[in-house]
Amino acid sequence: MSAGHPGDRDAEPTVSDTYEIRVTGAFSRGMVDEFAEFTTAVRPSETVIRGEIRDQSELHGVLDRLQRLGLHLVEVKRLPEDG
């Protein structure tokens, strides 16, 4: 099998992209802990979380977590790669 095909044990590791996700409202301390894998900036009217996400499945998982917490999604953007 060539690298990169589903089920290939020798496939190259997935490259992560950095995402920035904005939601309305300020995260509580417990919410910040819930998203510990992200950098979190809490502001009075919104919270911005930033971090690496490996693929679309992981992105949808993060968005589902935010939705379960009752947070209103404002923006999701993939940040450009550095240099």
Image (spheres, grey):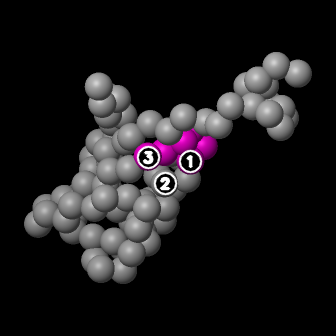
In front of the other: 12 or 31: 12
Q: Residue at x 49, y 54 (%)?
A: 62
Instruction: Confirm whether the magenta stretch covers residue 56.
Output: yes
C-alpha span from label 3 to label 2: 11 Å
Mark 3 neighbour class, 10 Å CA radius: few under 14, some 14 to 19, many 20 or more: some
Q: Position of residue 49 (x, y in %)?
A: 31, 55
Mark 2 neighbour class, 10 Å CA radius: few under 14, some 14 to 19, many 20 or more: some
Q: Which residues are magenta?
A: 52-58
* Secondary element type, mark 2: helix
Q: Position of residue 68 (x, y in %)?
A: 48, 65
The residue beneath circle 3 is 52
Query: Is 31 on the left-hand or right-hand side of 27?
Result: right
The residue beneath circle 2 is 62
Q: Residue at x 39, y 40 (%)?
A: 18
* The C terminus: image quadrant: top left
Do labels 1 and 2 touch, CB within 8 Å?
A: yes
